[in-house]
Amino acid sequence: MLHTATQRRILEVIEGAIGMVDTADAARHAERDTAVARILHELIVVARRGVISARVIEAHSDGPDLTEAEQSILAYLAERPGIRSTDVASAFALNRSTVSRQLDRLIDLGLVQVVDAAGRGRPLELTLLGHSLYEHTIARLRAETAQRMSGWSDAQVAEFAASLLRFNSPEPPGDAVTPAPPTPVVASDHALPASSPTSNERHTHD
């Protein structure tokens, strides 16, 4: 049998090794938490910059004066022609009456139209004016984005694009993650982060 002192020494060594592993794990978690916090901060900065830029541009624009919610819906319809107001409400986690109010105004401005179709609900899509507005905005934003990354290498741009795509991709099945509303937004000459209107008017397109 091992001497008691030797046994104690072995236990001390084992406990020390476990402590080193725990410390290393804690350090790794701390580094990851710091990185996640930094990412969140930068995303907030991007969103805030978009809002400020949009306000400045809109003040000097002849285009329609759209709210952030209307801008977001316009961009969403541009990417998904034929969807219904219920689809928009679900995507933005808003009640149908609130979304209908925003859609009513976009229709009145001539940017969105209702498409004849059989069945319940009415499909929505952008008008020619809406498409023109959207394409003009996207072209301008693409140019601004390219200019901002003009000092990046092709590999860095590709890596950043892949990381953003992965970040914005749906979570794998089984992961308990609350879905977030879409973020792309487009207005007369700019884009904004998606915004959720708070109106509770009772009017629907369905």
Image (cartoon, rainbow, N blue to C red):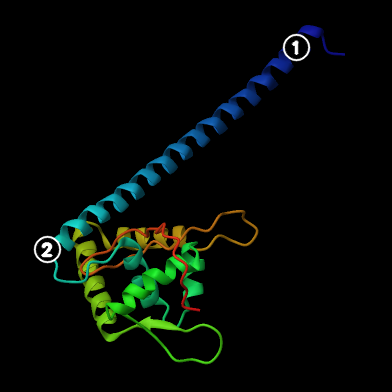
The amino acid sitting under disc 1 is Arg
Which residue reaches farthest right?
1
- Number of the label disc, if any, that sits on residue 32: none
Would you say 47 lies left or right of 95 here? left
Would you say 160 lies left or right of 149 here? right
Q: Nearer the viewer, mark 1 or mark 2?
A: 2
Q: Mark 1: which secondary structure?
A: helix
User: Viewer-proximal residue, 16 or 130?
Assistant: 130
Of the two numbered discs 1 and 2 on the same chain, state the one appearing first in sequence. Answer: 1
- The residue carrying mark 2 is 60
> In the picture, which quadrant includes the N terminus?
top right
**Dots 1 and 2: beta carbons under 8 Å?**
no
User: Viewer-proximal residue, 60 or 34?
Assistant: 60
Residue 5 locus on image (x, y percent)? 76, 7
How would you rate the neighbour count of disc 2 (Cα within 10 Å): few for under 14, some for 14-19, many for 20 or more? few
Residue 159 locus on image (x, y percent)? 37, 59
Figure check: 5 above or below 51? above
**For the point 26% across and 77% down, which residue is it?**
135
- The residue carrying mark 1 is 8
Residue 15 locus on image (x, y percent)? 68, 20
- Identify the image quadrant of residue 185: bottom left
Would you say 17 lies left or right of 55 here? right
Residue 89 locus on image (x, y percent)? 48, 68
Q: CA distance from mark 1 to mark 2?
A: 78 Å
**For the point 62% across and 55% down, which residue is it?**
175
The amino acid sitting under disc 2 is His
**For the point 52% across and 63% down, which residue is it?**
170
User: Viewer-proximal residue, 9 or 191?
Assistant: 191
